Image (spheres, helix red, strand yellow):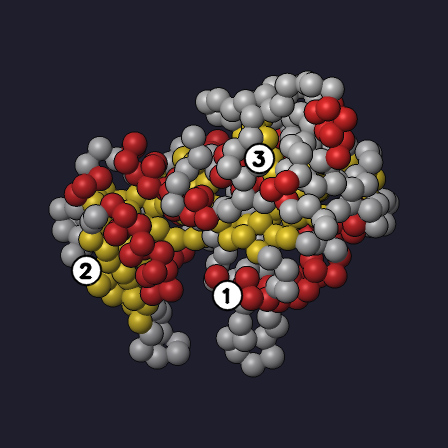
Amino acid sequence: APLSRSHLPPPPLPRGAQAGGGPGAACYLTRSRRAPALALSASAGEPQPALCSRRCLFLPSGAAMPNIVLFSGSSHQDLSQRVAERLGLELGKVVTKKFSNQETSVEIGESVRGEDVYIIQSGCGEINDNLMELLIMINACKIASSSRVTAVIPCFPYARQDKKDKSRAPISAKLVANMLSVAGADHIITMDLHASQIQGFFDIPVDNLYAEPAVLQWIKENILEWRNCIIVSPDAGGAKRVTSIADRLNVEFALIHKERKKANEVDRMVLVGDVKDRIAILVDDMADTCGTVCHAADKLVSAGATKVYAILTHGIFSGPAISRINNAAFEAVVVTNTIPQDEKMKNCPKIQVIDISMILAEAIRRTHNGESVSYLFSHVPL
């Protein structure tokens, strides 16, 4: 009769690893196909590595993770490098270039046969070129016999085009989902989707991570009087996100309702909630031209807020966004580094950045090891 998983001998230690756990140790799951390799060494009387209750092998935090390759697209090299350093890996060799007719060319510079491949590419900058580059990289790894290809997309492109809001409007987010699946992606890791229902556009697993734990940590560390704050949503669509943060901080929340009396009249903003003599913290998933959040900040100041902060997961900041932020009444505009912010920070001293590379790195490690990622929905990895 075939042996059950619990009867398999433990796997061999990967090169450079030590037996036993310890502070900051990571573990990878026993792979049944690797197990017979240890049967010979076990009979020779060699010491066995320490195993946890799930027969996992503990690796020191600096030890290499086996059977994993991490590639970076050209959209956000800095974030990819931070994730790789966090995992103790080196980024895989890949060359991306354009032909003279602007076609994208990708060359994978190392073997990925049988490997667990992760490709980090954010939906920012030259979005269409970067999306095409990601699709080509996924397909190149898939037809090179990789065992699994995971697309790590911190900022999902076309996420705002997720429904038919008027006649003949395309649902482009669904199209992007189909393209990723057809290219050969087996799994998607993303952060703060504009609408959670986008996960349903895929027939493959999607892990939608949240920046909320990192946002809560930033608020507690950087706003001294955070117990006297009020969390505000700049539109009705973000009410669920705001109430979750307000509950975790045990403070009140408010929202701003955009009212339109006639089709050709300018929107009128109505504040629902009391912000007088409080610190107002605007929270949203993304800001593009910043028209809504800047109008919301003016509304909060006129309603008696002492200070106004804005915390946004994806800081796109296109068009007149930077000048609007500079002229608005913000103490600080806090964004994550799902999109590169170096150039924008030079032109706008109000912009501050929360690093979320450790969340992505931990999601990759847990996915590779077959562990649950739900811990990351409420905690920031140390």
Amino acid at circle 1 = Gln
Q: Nearer the viewer, residue 161 or 3?
A: 3
- Which mark's residue is nearer the viewer, 1 or 3? 3
Label 1 and label 2: CA atoms lie apart by 28 Å
Which mark is on residue 286?
none
Task: Report x, y in % for residue 288.
Answer: 48, 53
Q: Residue at x 19, y 60 (%)?
A: 273
How many other residues sit within 10 Å of disc 2, few (<14), some (14-19) or many (≥20)?
Answer: some
Q: Establish if 325 lies above or below 342.
A: below
Q: Residue at x 63, y 64 (%)?
A: 203
Q: Which residue is disc 1 drawn over? A: 197
SS category of the residue bearing label 1: helix
Q: Establish if 12 lies above or below 47.
A: below
Q: Nearer the viewer, residue 129 or 349?
A: 129
Q: Which residue is disc 2 drawn over? A: 273
Task: Report x, y in % for residue 181.
Answer: 70, 60
Q: Residue furthest left?
A: 277
Which badge, 1 or 3, is on the more N-terminal residue?
3
Which mark is on residue 56?
3
